[in-house]
Image: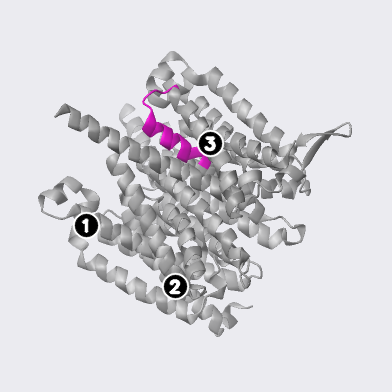
C-alpha cells in the first residue's frame, strides 16, 4: 500500500484515529504514574484484567466488547484495591504486592480460559488477541468507546487538576490543604485502570505498560511544569499511536501494537539524548565547555 | 514412574526453584524485574533461532537465559543516565524488547512454527510425554531432570553465596568495603533468575513464572522476620502450591499452571490476613 492510498482506506483511517486517541489518553495518565514512580501499575492492571474478561464471557456468553471491558474493568480495579490494601497494612512494598497479585490474577485468568475453551462455540483467538492486541481489527464502534472514555478521563483530570498536582508532588502538603488524598488516589487509580483497559485490545497486555510510560518519560525530559509534561506526553502518545498504525498498514505483516511501542521507544531515546538542559548530549557538551573554561583558567 | 506423580514433582520442583532467586529479588525491591525477564526471554529465543535455524537446539535456551542479564543491563543503563526512575526504565525496556520479538516472529519466522503461545503460557500436561532416554532406556521425563537440576542449582548457589547475598541485598556499601562486588552479585542473581525462568517456562509458561518467583516469597516475607527462614518458607509454599495446584486442576479439569499460580495467590492472601491479625493482636496486647 502506498502512503497516499492509505488515507483513502476507511479501515486504516479508523485504526489510525483510534490508536492516536488511545496514545493520547494513556500518555496523559502515564504522566501521573511516572511522576508517582508507579510506572508498572499499567502492566499489573493489564495482566489482572484477564480473569475479568474471561469471566464476563463465561457468565454472559457474549463476545460484545462493552461486556468484556466491563469485566476487565472490575477485575483490574479489584486487583488494584488488593495491592493498595496489601501495601497499606503490611511491610510489603508496592512492587512486590503488584507482582504477586497480578501474576496470580493472570493465573486465575488462564484457569477460567480453559473452562471457556470447553464451551462449544469458543475459539482460541481470545487469549491471543488479549496478549498481543488486535489493533488492525479496530472498528468505528471501538473508536467511539475510546473517545467517550478519553473525554471522560480528560474532564476528570481537568476538574481535579489542582488536587492531582498537589497529590502527585507533595502528599503531605496536599493533606494540609485539606485535599482528600485517599479519594484522589482512588480516582487516579480508577482512571489509570480505565485507560489501560481500553488500550488492551489494541496493543495487548504486555505492551500496554509502554503506552503508559514511554510518552510520559519522554515528555519529562523536555519540560518542568506538570501541564506542559501532560500535554507533551499526550502529544507523544498520539504521534506514536498514529505512526504505529500507519507503519502497520504500510508494510505487510508488521503488527500494529509492537510498531506503536517501538515508535514510542524511539521518541523516548531521542528525548533522553537530545532534550535541552537534561539530555545526555547537552550534558556532555556542557561538561566539555566546563572543561575548556577550566583549562582557560590554567593559562 | 506414574505420570501424575511425575507432573506433581515437576510442578513442585519448578515452583520451589523459582522461589529461591525470587526471595532475593523481593528483598532488593526488584520484584518486577522477574516480570521483565520472563517477557524478554521470548526475544532471546527468537534471536537464537535465527542464528541456528533449529527449534530443538539447546542454543535457544542459552539465548533465552542470556536475555535476562541483557535486560537488566539495558534497564540499568537507562537508570544511570539519571533521567528515568527505575520503574519507568523497567517498564520501557521490556515492552520494547518484547515488541522486537513479536515483529521478528510475525515477519520472518512465520513458516518456522515458532509457537509463541507455548512460550508464554506453557502446558504441564504434556511434560511426561517428553522422555529422557539413556542408551535406549527410559529414565524419566525430561522436565523432571530440568526442574530438579535447576532446583538443586539454586539451592547450591543459595548455600554458597548466602552471606554475600545477604550483605549485598541490605548494605551494598558495606559489601563493597568488605570486598564483594554488589554489581557482580547482582548480575549473578539475575543470571540465576533468568536460567530458572527459562527452565520453568516450558512447564508453566513465562508469564506465570512471575507468580512462582514473587508470590511465595511475598507470603514468606509476611510470615517470618528471619532472613534464613525466608527462602525456606518460600520454597515450601512454592512446592505446596505446585502439588495443590495439580490436584485442583485435575479435579476441575482446567490448566495446571494456572491453578498453581492461583494457589500461590491464595497463600499470599492468607499470609497477609495472618499478618494483619497478628499485628492487631500485638497492638491490642500493648494497650
Q: Which corner quadrant holds the N terminus of chain A?
A: bottom right
For image coordinates 44% across by 27% down, the residue present is B230
Q: Residues within 10 Å of mark 1 (few under 14, many from 20)?
A: few
Q: Where is residue A278 in the image (x, y as percent from the top left)?
A: 35, 47
Q: Alpha-carbon distance for marks 2 and 3?
A: 36 Å
Of circles 1 and 3, the one toward us is: 3
Residue at (57% x, 24% y) in the render: B155
Q: Mark 1 lies on which chain?
A: A
Residue B204, which numbered label? none
Q: Are marks 2 and 1 on the same chain?
A: yes
Q: Which of A205 and A83 is in front in this view?
A: A83
State if disc 1 and disc 2 touch (CB < 8 Å).
no
For label 2, the residue is A67
Q: Can residue A234 be seen in this view?
A: yes
Q: Is B90 placed above or below B228 here?
A: below
Instruction: Compare residues B69 and B246 and report the one nearer the observer.
Output: B246
Graded by Cα atoms within 10 Å as few (under 14), some (14 to 19) or many (20 or more), the crowding at tag 2 reads: some
Magenta residues?
B212-228
Amino acid at each position: 500500500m502506498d502512503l497516499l492510498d492509505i488515507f483513502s482506506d476507511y479501515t486504516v483511517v479508523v485504526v489510525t484515529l483510534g490508536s492516536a486517541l488511545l496514545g493520547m489518553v494513556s500518555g496523559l495518565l502515564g504522566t501521573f504514574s511516572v511522576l508517582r514512580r508507579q510506572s508498572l501499575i499499567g502492566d499489573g492492571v493489564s495482566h489482572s484484567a484477564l480473569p475479568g474478561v474471561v469471566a464476563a464471557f463465561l457468565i454472559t456468553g457474549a463476545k460484545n466488547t462493552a461486556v468484556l471491558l466491563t469485566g476487565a474493568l472490575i477485575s483490574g480495579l479489584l486487583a488494584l484495591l488488593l495491592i493498595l490494601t496489601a501495601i497499606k497494612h503490611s511491610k510489603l512494598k508496592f512492587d512486590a504486592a503488584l507482582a504477586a497479585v497480578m501474576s496470580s490474577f493472570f493465573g486465575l485468568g488462564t484457569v477460567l480460559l480453559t473452562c471457556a475453551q470447553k464451551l462449544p462455540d469458543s475459539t482460541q483467538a481470545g487469549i491471543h488477541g488479549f496478549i498481543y492486541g488486535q489493533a488492525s481489527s479496530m472498528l468505528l464502534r471501538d473508536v467511539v468507546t475510546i473517545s467517550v472514555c478519553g473525554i471522560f478521563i480528560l474532564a476528570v483530570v481537568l476538574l481535579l487538576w489542582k488536587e492531582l498536582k498537589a497529590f502527585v508532588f507533595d502528599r503531605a502538603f496536599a493533606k494540609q490543604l485539606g485535599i482528600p488524598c485517599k479519594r484522589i488516589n482512588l480516582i487516579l487509580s480508577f482512571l489509570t485502570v480505565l485507560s489501560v483497559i481500553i488500550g488492551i485490545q489494541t496493543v495487548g497486555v504486555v505492551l500496554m505498560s509502554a503506552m503508559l510510560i514511554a510518552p510520559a518519560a519522554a515528555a519529562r525530559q523536555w519540560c518542568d511544569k506538570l501541564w506542559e509534561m501532560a500535554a507533551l506526553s499526550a502529544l507523544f502518545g498520539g504521534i506514536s499511536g498514529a505512526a504505529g498504525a500507519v507503519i502497520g498498514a504500510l508494510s505487510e505483516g508488521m503488527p500494529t501494537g509492537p510498531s506503536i511501542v517501538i515508535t514510542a521507544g524511539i521518541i523516548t531515546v531521542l528525548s533522553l539524548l537530545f532534550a535541552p538542559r537534561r539530555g545526555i548530549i547537552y550534558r556532555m557538551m556542557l561538561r566539555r565547555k566546563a572543561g575548556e573554561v577550566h583549562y582557560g583558567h590554567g593559562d | 514412574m506414574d505420570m501424575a506423580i511425575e507432573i506433581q514433582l515437576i510442578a513442585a520442583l519448578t515452583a520451589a526453584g523459582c522461589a529461591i532467586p525470587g526471595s532475593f529479588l523481593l528483598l532488593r525491591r526488584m520484584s518486577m524485574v522477574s516480570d521483565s525477564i520472563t517477557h524478554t526471554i521470548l526475544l532471546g529465543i527468537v534471536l537464537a533461532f535465527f542464528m541456528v535455524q533449529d527449534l530443538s537446539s539447546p542454543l535457544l535456551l542459552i539465548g533465552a537465559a542470556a536475555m535476562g542479564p541483557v535486560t537488566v543491563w539495558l534497564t540499568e543503563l537507562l537508570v544511570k543516565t539519571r533521567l528515568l526512575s527505575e520503574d519507568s526504565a523497567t517498564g520501557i525496556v521490556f515492552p520494547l524488547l518484547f515488541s522486537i520479538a513479536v515483529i521478528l516472529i510475525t515477519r520472518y519466522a512465520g513458516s518456522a512454527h515458532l509457537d509463541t503461545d507455548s512460550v508464554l503460557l506453557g502446558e504441564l500436561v504434556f511434560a511426561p510425554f517428553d522422555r529422557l532416554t539413556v542408551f535406549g532406556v527410559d529414565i524419566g521425563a525430561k522436565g523432571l531432570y530440568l526442574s530438579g537440576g535447576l532446583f538443586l542449582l539454586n539451592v547450591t548457589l543459595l548455600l554458597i553465596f548466602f552471606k554475600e547475598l545477604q550483605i549485598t541485598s541490605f548494605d551494598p556499601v558495606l559489601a563493597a568495603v568488605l570486598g564483594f562486588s554488589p554489581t557482580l552479585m547482582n548480575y549473578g542473581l539475575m543470571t540465576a533468575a533468568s536460567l530458572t525462568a527459562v527452565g520453568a517456562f516450558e512447564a508453566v509458561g513465562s508469564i506465570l513464572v512471575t507468580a512462582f518467583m514473587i508470590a511465595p516469597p511475598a507470603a514468606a516475607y509476611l510470615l517470618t522476620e528471619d532472613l534464613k527462614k525466608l527462602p525456606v518458607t518460600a520454597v515450601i509454599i512454592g512446592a505446596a502450591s505446585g502439588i495443590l495446584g495439580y490436584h485442583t486442576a485435575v479435579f476441575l479439569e482446567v490448566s495446571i499452571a494456572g491453578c498453581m499460580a492461583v494457589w500461590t495467590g491464595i497463600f499470599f492472601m492468607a499470609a497477609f490476613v495472618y499478618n494483619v491479625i497478628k499485628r492487631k493482636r500485638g497492638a491490642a496486647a500493648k494497650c
